[in-house]
């Protein structure tokens, strides 16, 4: 399944959320339209049309900037066809998924002599992750958002996925996230974070830490920390265990926040060296 097609599936499943995000409207009168238009058929897996009241929201998801015909002309072509067929307001948004400096990702109009047609572009790497982390419908896109620490962001996404109560919805969200995160991360690391056991343990871990801080139960926080470390890195040397045991509840919480940014055991050792010597 392509990256673009995953986004189309999300928009089809959660059109209300995409309308709210992209045009800021709350509407229950929403219909997902067919993607084939009259005249010479043009169709792409990455295109979706959503009718919200008397407006068509045309979303085009793009991983690459190159296309035939070029994106600006294609947006004009779609606009004319949609306007002719539905005779209502048409809002067009191109969502670029993978970071690029190609000028097409920053272009918002088609221009030729006296013809000018404008549309919007959304670059996922410029988006604030808070909107996506707080919405299970948009959550799979969160790993592509703006961040100073991509690994920490993916960790947050995994924890939010784990909190989804419905098992099927949670598994689908994990699958969509795994595919889209592939634009930014190695597959092995993604699967490691999105393992259901690891995600659930992470959520439990955070809850235990919070309760541990309230009740002073450092022992419970320590137990779950060691359990997570064993799941992630396998059997751990006793010297590492002793170093972890020396950590305060506050330090254990800090370790929990940094945990998923560790690529290997040596990252953990560096962190412990820096945090047990102070």
Image (spheres, rainbow, N blue to C red):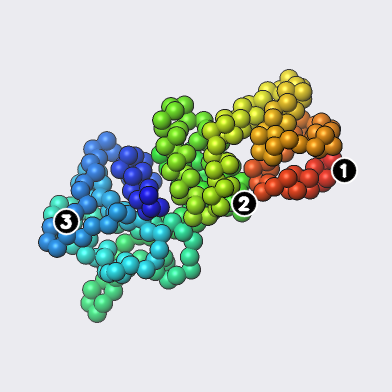
Above or below: residue 90 compared with residue 71: above
Instruction: Specify the farthest residue to the front.
Output: 235
Contact (CB < 8 A) between labels 3 and 1? no
The residue tagged 1 is 277
- For marks 3 and 2, the one nearer the N-term is 3
Res. 37 mark = 3
* CA separation in Å, label 3 and label 2: 42 Å
* Foreground pick, 152 / 146: 152
* 10 Å crowding of disc 2: few (<14), some (14-19), many (20+): few
The quadrant of the picture occupied by the C terminus is top right
Examine the image and state in which quarter residue 167 appears. Answer: top left
Identify residue for label 2.
149
Is residue 81 shown left or right of residue 172?
A: left
Q: Is residue 135 visible?
A: no
Whole-percent x, y for residue 42 in the image: 21, 60
Vertical placement of residue 203 versus 139, above or below? above
Identify the secondary structure beneath mark 2. loop
Residue 22 is situated, as x and y percent measured from the top left of the image, at: 36, 49
Residue 265 visible to an observer of this rendering: yes
Could you say which is closer to the camera, residue 270 or residue 216?
270
- Choose the circle earlier in sequence order: 3 or 1: 3
The single residue placed furthest to the top in the displayed view is 215
């Amino acid at each position: 399944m392509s990256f673009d097609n995953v986004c189309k599936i999300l928009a089809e499943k959660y059109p209300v959320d995409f309308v709210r995000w992209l045009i800021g409207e709350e509407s229950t009168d929403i219909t997902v339209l067919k993607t084939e238009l009259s005249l010479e058929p043009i169709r792409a897996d990455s295109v979706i049309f959503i009718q919200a009241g008397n407006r068509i929201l045309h979303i085009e998801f793009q991983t690459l900037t190159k296309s035939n015909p070029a994106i600006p002309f294609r947006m004009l072509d779609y606009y004319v066809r949609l306007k002719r067929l539905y005779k209502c307001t048409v809002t067009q948004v191109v969502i670029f998924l993978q970071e690029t400096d190609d000028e097409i990702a920053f272009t918002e109009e088609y221009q030729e002599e006296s013809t000018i047609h404008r549309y919007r572009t959304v670059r996922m790497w410029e988006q604030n992750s808070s909107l996506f982390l707080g919405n299970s419908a948009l959550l799979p896109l969160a790993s592509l958002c703006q961040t100073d620490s991509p690994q920490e962001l993916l960790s947050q996404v995994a924890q939010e996925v784990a909190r989804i109560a419905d098992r099927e919805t949670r598994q689908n969200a994990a699958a969509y996230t795994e595919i889209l995160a592939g634009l930014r991360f190695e597959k092995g690391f993604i699967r490691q974070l999105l393992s259901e056991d690891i995600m659930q343990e992470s959520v439990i871990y955070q809850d235990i830490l919070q309760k541990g801080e309230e009740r002073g139960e450092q022992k419970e926080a320590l137990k779950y920390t060691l359990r997570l470390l064993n799941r992630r890195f396998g059997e751990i040397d006793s010297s590492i265990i002793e170093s972890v045991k020396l950590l305060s509840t506050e330090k254990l919480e800090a370790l929990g926040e940094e945990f998923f940014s560790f690529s290997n055991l040596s990252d953990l050792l560096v962190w412990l060296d820096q945090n047990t010597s102070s």
